[in-house]
């Protein structure tokens, strides 16, 4: 039997290069070998956007368009809208009884995201429990593999713990998934931050114009200890060179820039200019495909409807097994 992938994103806006190296590249590469479901997690997006839910529809379409732009093929991949599969909510509620508050409080990904969101009016229960919702997303599709960024590894481990407890308590019907981290564990932000994040405004988006890419690259953080172009600089930990290593296919050029930077014989402007050219070349075909799909929103919606229909069929089957295992498949 062909193995299955479940992965996805919260529709909080367009996707960026961090998403690409963290997960999207693996999804595109594996779509020919796995039965692939990609979830647009709009319910989870509501956990910190509940005061402006009207934004979600446009964001769902933005994310779906990005998926198609990077090369996900709707003939091979089912793109599923989370809120249109009510079985996910049912399984989330059942899973809530298998997780303690102490376990959630120890989750490092959740703690970091709570810190980033800075909930001034208190922490919403929906956000606090979204690792449980994520576990339901993965297990309802019986996913074997979950392509994720490094920061999501604690979430996958949480899911594995829930699966083990469910299978032990009731019946061994759920699949214990494993994570697959992208080619780059974590892409730094353009501000030198540890992670590219929409909420921090330090991203280069997949749909950025050539002018936007150049502006973002030329404003990138480099080596704060380097005052003049003739000063020897640091390559390690320098985001500009991290991006060069990932996105610049001309390895001889990258090596030359590194050597000259270490010696103080090349300035930041030249290094950034060549990074801009490499990034713009990488993004151009994605940008073109994105524009093509964005011009046909009705077709994108059809893809979402069909993917969700197929996803819900799988979810229904799993929930029948879950209810039977829990002895709550009532006959009346």
Image: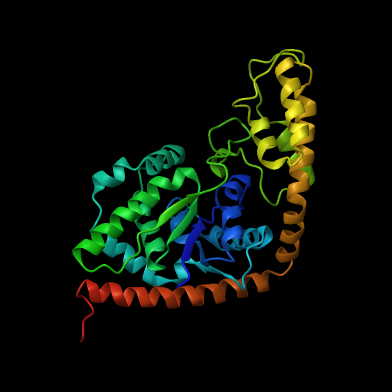
107 and 234: which is toward the camera: 234
Visual colour scheme: rainbow
Coordinates of residue 293 in the picture (x, y in percent)? 71, 65
Coordinates of residue 24 in the picture (x, y in percent)? 59, 54
65 and 24: which is toward the camera: 24
Residue 207 visible to an observer of this rendering = yes
Residue at the image position 71 percent from the left and 63 percent from the top = 294
Q: Quadrant of the N terminus?
A: bottom left
Q: Is residue 303 left or right of residue 312?
A: right
Residue at the image position 27 percent from the left and 58 percent from the top = 164
Residue at the bottom extreme of this rendering: 332
Coordinates of residue 81 in the picture (x, y in percent)? 50, 67
Please identify the quarter of the rendering in which residue 230 is found: top right
Q: Is residue 52 above or below residue 80?
A: above
Residue at the image position 52 percent from the left and 56 percent from the top = 9
Coordinates of residue 194 in the picture (x, y in percent)? 53, 33
Residue at the image position 57 percent from the left and 58 percent from the top = 27
Q: Is residue 52 left or right of residue 106?
A: right
Q: Quadrant of the C terminus?
A: bottom left
300 and 249: which is toward the camera: 249
Please identify the quarter of the rendering in which residue 268 is found: top right
Q: Is residue 228 left or right of residue 236?
A: right
């Amino acid at each position: 039997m062909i193995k299955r992938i479940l992965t996805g994103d919260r529709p909080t806006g367009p996707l960026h290069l961090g998403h690409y190296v963290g997960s999207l590249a693996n999804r595109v590469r594996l779509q020919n070998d796995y039965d692939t479901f990609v979830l647009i997690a709009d319910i989870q997006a509501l956990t910190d956007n509940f005061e402006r839910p009207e934004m979600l529809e446009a964001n769902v379409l933005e994310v779906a368009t990005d998926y198609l732009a990077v090369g996900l093929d709707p003939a091979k991949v089912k793109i599923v809208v989370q809120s249109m599969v009510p079985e996910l909510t049912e399984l989330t509620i059942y899973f809530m009884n298998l997780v303690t508050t102490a376990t959630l409080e120890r989750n490092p990904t959740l703690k970091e995201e709570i810190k980033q969101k800075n909930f001034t009016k208190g922490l919403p229960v929906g956000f606090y429990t979204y690792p449980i919702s994520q576990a339901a997303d993965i297990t309802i599709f019986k996913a074997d593999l979950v392509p994720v960024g490094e920061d999501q590894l604690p979430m996958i481990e949480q899911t594995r713990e829930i699966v083990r407890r469910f299978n032990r308590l009731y019946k061994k019907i759920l699949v214990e998934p494993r994570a697959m981290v992208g080619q780059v564990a974590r892409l730094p932000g353009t501000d030198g931050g540890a992670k590219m994040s929409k909420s921090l405004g330090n991203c280069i988006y997949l749909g950025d114009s050539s002018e936007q890419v150049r502006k973002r690259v030329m404003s990138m953080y480099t080596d704060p200890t380097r005052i003049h172009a003739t000063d020897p600089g640091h390559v390690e930990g320098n985001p500009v060179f991290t991006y060069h290593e990932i996105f610049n296919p001309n390895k001889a050029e990258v090596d030359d820039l590194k050597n000259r930077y270490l010696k103080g014989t090349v300035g930041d402007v030249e290094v950034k200019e060549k990074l801009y050219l490499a990034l713009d070349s990488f993004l151009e075909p994605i940008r073109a495909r994105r524009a093509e799909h964005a011009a046909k929103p009705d077709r994108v919606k059809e893809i979402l409807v069909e993917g969700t229909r197929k996803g819900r069929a799988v979810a229904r089957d799993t929930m029948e097994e879950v209810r039977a295992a829990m002895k709550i498949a009532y006959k009346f």
